[in-house]
Structures are given as structure tokens and as C-alpha cells.
Image: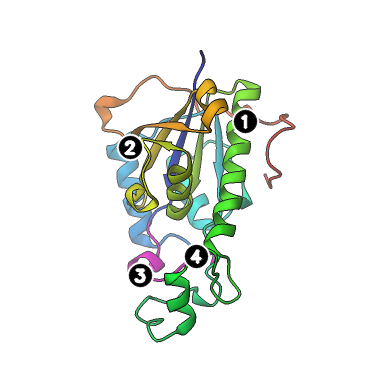
Amino acid sequence: MKTYQIHLLRHGITDGNVKGQYIGSKDIPLNDMGIEHIRSLDENYIYPGAAAYFTSPMQRCKQTLGIIYPNVKPIDIDEFRECDFGEFEGLTAQELSGSKDFAEWLASDGSTAPPSGESGLEFGRRVCQAFEKIVEALMKTGVPSAVIMTHGGVIMTILAQYGLPEASMAEWTMEPGCGYSVRIHPQLWSAAKKVEVYQTLPLPKEDDDDGYDAEYFFADVEDLPETEA
């Protein structure tokens, strides 16, 4: 039976990463170190090509994708944005240490949102709905592979929900510019909505394979999530 691959990649380093800030809805770019780091990874390792490319609309993701895959036409998926941290945006845990709202948010089961922000449950719901639409679209159209350039929290949420082997969000961490490849077996997906996590990214050069050219096959597919091209 035909299988499908999705390569999940985290964007490069930003000033927010360096400073340890909560950055979700704040649209900040890669910093100089982040740009050079992604260029170095791209030069020394292998990022697999795919038949379709999707990205969070945040510029840090679009910049990263543009460095690695300069000749592709990605589709922006708004639902693959990072969690909206509301009033915590741009602040560090140390700066928030005296906040009652922050303490309640950290202690909650995901149902509590930062002031003017998004709860973990809301975040997980939108991310998972978008991922399921992508999987279903791949299987319906027969398009064999996709790259999703997004945020660490998005990837951790997807793998904690759908990944095999099963593991918690905290066990699916990755460095900037890195990620995971998953394989969709249609029978397994239909029965249990699970995907096989089969490799980490990027790959050592000796692991490169023929893969697929960076072509874009989704122009006329009606079943994709609503997007901005």
C-alpha cells in the first residue's frame, strides 16, 4: 500500500530564542546567527525535497524555508502559527515570575490561557485540525510528500498527538532548523490516526536519497485547508 511522508521542520534562531522570551504571535525575523546557522545546516546536511510545501505565515518560518528551499512555492497555513502567548509575549519566565496569571497558566492542564492569549487546548485543537486536513489531502490526491515549516510547539503538539512511538510533548523537542519525518500508512491512519516517526532532520549527507524534486502539485486541489498563497 502506498505511504506518504511529511517532513516537519522548525524555523531558525531568533532574538527571542536567544533571550528565552515567549514568542508566539509576535512576528519576529531570524537574527543574523539564525540565518547563518540555517545556511550552514543546508550546506553540510540534507533536507529532503518534497512534492508540496507548507509554512506558518510567520516571517521566521518563511525565511527559513526560503533559505533551504529557495525555488519552491509554499502555501501559508495560518493554523500552523505558534501559540499566542497574549500579554506574556516578548517576556521571559524570570520577568513573569511574580505574576499570578503566569503561575496559574503554568500550573493548568492546558485550559487556562494567558491574558489576551490562547490556551494550550485551543492551540492544540487548531494545529491538529490543520494537520489532519493536510494528511487527508495527501491521501486523496496521491501527492506523496510534503514539507511543513513551522514552530517547535506546533511540531511537538503534532507528534505527541499522532506520533508512533508514542511520547509526551517534552520528548519531541528539537533544535532550531531541525525536525522529524513522519510516514503515513493509510490503513493505520484510518484505524487509529497515528503516523510513524521514522527519522530526525536534517540528514547526514550519506543518508541522502533520490527523494522528489521540489515541485508544487497542489495548485488545483480543492480539499486543502483555506490558505493564503
Of labels 2 and 4, earlier in sequence is 4
- How crowded is the residue under tag 4: few (<14 C-alpha within 10 Å), some, or many (20+)? some
| Spatial CA span between label 3 and label 4 | 14 Å
Q: Do tag 1 and tag 3 residues touch (Cβ < 8 Å)?
A: no
The answer to whether 173 appears left or right of 75 in the picture is: left
Report if the CB atoms under discs 2 and 4 are less than 8 Å apart: no
Q: Do the numbered discs 2 and 1 sit on residues whose CB atoms are within 8 Å?
A: no
> Quadrant where the C terminus lies?
top right
* Disc 4 element: loop
Colour scheme shown: rainbow
Q: Is residue 67 visible?
A: no
The one nearer the camera, 150 or 183, is: 183
Mark on residue 200?
Answer: 2
Mark 2 or mark 1: whose residue is earlier in sequence: 1
Q: Per the image, is 186 magenta?
A: no
Disc 4 or 1, which lies upstream in sequence?
4
How far apart are the two marked residues, 4 and 1, measured between alpha carbons? Answer: 31 Å
* Residue sitting nearer the eye, 130 or 205: 130
Residue 198 on image: x %, y %: 36, 30
Q: How dense is the environment of label 2, judged by Cα within 10 Å: few (below 14), some, or many (20 and up)?
A: some
User: What are the residue bounds of the magenta stretch?
Assistant: 13-27
Q: Measuring 71% from the left and 30% from the top, which residue is drawn there? A: 221
What is the CA distance from the residue labelled 2 to the residue labelled 4? 26 Å
Q: Earlier in the sequence, mark 1 or mark 3?
A: 3
What's the residue type where badge 3 is placed?
A: Gly
Q: CA distance from mark 1 to mark 3?
A: 36 Å
Q: Is residue 53 above or below residue 66?
A: above
Residue 136: which disc?
1
Q: Which comes before the other along the chain, label 3 or label 4?
A: 3
Residue contact at pointers 3 and 4, CB within 8 angstroms: no
* Label 3 sits on residue: 20
Q: Position of residue 7 (x, y in %)?
A: 45, 36
